[in-house]
Image (cartoon, grey):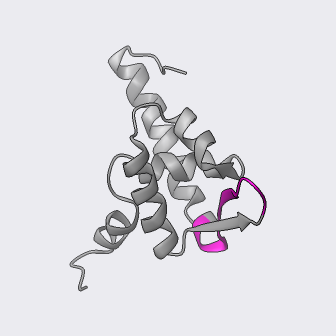
Amino acid sequence: MAYNIPVEATLEVMGGKWKAVILCHLDKGDKRTSELKRLMPGITQKMLTQQLRELEDDGLVKRQIFEQVPPKVVYSLTGYGWSLKPVLDAMCAWGEKHIEQEGQTVEV
């Protein structure tokens, strides 16, 4: 795909409501699918699976399967995924300022 400006490439890879949120959670450590689902109550299982697959296809997230009963799947950031940390940190910092400006609070 040809991009007119570099930000288009960034948005292509991590655009949408959930990808950046998933990346932020994985920034805090490896997570199982059920952990990510619990951390993001507004996402459907189908959407979570789709977003994780796309992040994996783009080389940002690694999926590790442990051969046991029941099977265990753990997601983590790849080296390439970690390269987005400064972008995610900047987005979080801006979001905090925006929340304050709007007089809102963060739901935990």
Bounds of the magenta segment: 68-81
Q: Position of residue 91 (x, y in %)?
A: 46, 46
- 92 over 96 or under it: above or below: below
| Image quadrant assignment for residue 45 | top left
Residue visible at 69% across and 66% down in the picture: 65
In the image, taking residue 18 as reference, residue 81 lies left or right, namely right
The answer to if 80 sits in the magenta stretch is yes
Residue sticking out furthest to the bottom: 2
Q: Position of residue 4 (x, y in %)?
A: 21, 78
Residue sticking out furthest to the front: 69
In the image, taking residue 24 as reference, residue 55 lies left or right, namely left
Q: Position of residue 28 (x, y in %)?
A: 69, 46
Labels in figure, total:
0
Q: Nearer the viewer, residue 72 or 83?
A: 72
- 88 over 2 or under it: above or below: above
| Image quadrant assignment for residue 67 | bottom right
In the image, taking residue 84 as reference, residue 97 lies left or right, namely left
| Image quadrant assignment for residue 80 | bottom right
